[in-house]
Image (cartoon, helix red, strand yellow):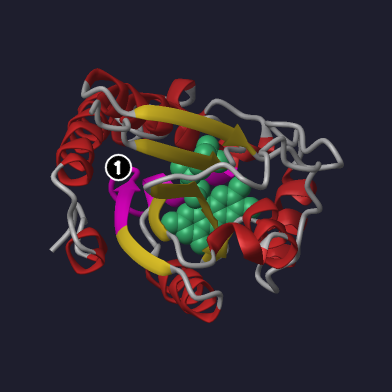
Amino acid sequence: MPFAPVRVLIVFYSYSGQSSVLIRRLAAGLLDEGVEVRQERLQPQQTLRFPLGSISKTLWLMFITLFRTRFAIQPLTLADDESYDMMVLAGPTWSWNPSGPVLALLDQYPGLFRQRSVLAVISCRGYWRSHWRYLRKRLLGMAANPCGPLVFSHPQREPWRTFGVFLKVAGMAPERSSSLFSRFYPRFGHTRQQCDEAYALGRQLAARLKTGSTQEQLRSFKNLP
Ligand SMILES: Cc1cc2nc3c(=O)[nH]c(=O)nc-3n(C[C@H](O)[C@H](O)[C@H](O)COP(=O)(O)O)c2cc1C
């Protein structure tokens, strides 16, 4: 009798494109190993333009997201009865928390997580721990099996990466600005190597799923010690 293919559901949000690039590569790794992948990108009900275009709007967004402000999302296109071997939940860190659209997803779709292994993928400037602590607690509260996380931090040094993200969201191009800044901040976001890492992790995850890993083994699927 033929084996049923391994199936993975990827639900993600990306504001400035970084999570979306990582997810594309992770999904490519899974697909290349014969895994069936279903992707669902969260769409906020109110469009959040990138870049915001001003410093005051950027400060405001960073301020309100400190309080875990929910950003209402459009209804998901998933059918209720679809079954998956694992779910991937990916998105950026916003003010030490999951992003507003992911918070709305957790509130509105608890049934999506119940009894599922959920691998968290986090794209951030570098400060992901409280994001993960909160997300893990919420997943456990919904009877999910929180796995990972896979964390991808912007590789530039501080304080350049903090200013870099801020200016980028505000609508400037710090990587092309004064010679001093661009020397320490040559590009915004993740590197080619990190995208390659996401691809390799997709293949490794596929191998684990195909060998029927236990919930315990899936929980420890991380890219950090
Ligand atoms: C409103 C806002 C708040 C942010 N807060 C944090 C933070 O607390 N910690 C961090 O490491 N990165 C933070 N970042 C940076 C993003 O997590 C980072 O740029 C990420 O790669 C963006 O992913 P995306 O392009 O998929 O949205 C913040 C970005 C925004 C827009």
User: Is residue 72 among what the camera can see?
Assistant: yes
Could you say where residue 7 lies in the image, as x and y percent from the top left? 39, 36
Q: Residues within 10 Å of mark 1 (few under 14, many from 20)?
A: many
Front-lying residue, 16 or 120: 120
Q: Which quadrant, please, contains the C terminus?
A: bottom left
Question: Relative to 212, is 67 above or below?
Answer: below
Number of on-image labels: 1
Question: Relative to 30, is 123 above or below?
Answer: below
Q: Which quadrant, please, contains the N terminus?
A: top left
**Residue 106 is one of the magenta-drawn residues:** no
Residue 32: image quadrant is: top left
Could you tell me which residue is drawn at 50 percent across and 71 percent down?
A: 139
Could you tell me which residue is drawn at 66 percent across and 38 percent down?
A: 78
Could you say where residue 20 lies in the image, as x and y percent from the top left? 49, 31
Question: Relative to 204, is 195 above or below?
Answer: above
Residue at label 1? 156
Front-lying residue, 60 or 107: 107
User: Is residue 188 among what the camera can see?
Assistant: no
Could you say where residue 21 lies in the image, as x and y percent from the top left? 43, 27
Question: Relative to 93, is 170 above or below?
Answer: above
93 with respect to 35 (left or right): right
Could you tell me which residue is drawn at 41 percent across and 57 percent down?
A: 118
Q: Which residues are magenta?
A: 149-166
**What's under tag 1, amino acid-wise?**
Gln
**Residue 152 is one of the magenta-drawn residues:** yes
Residue 207: image quadrant is: top left
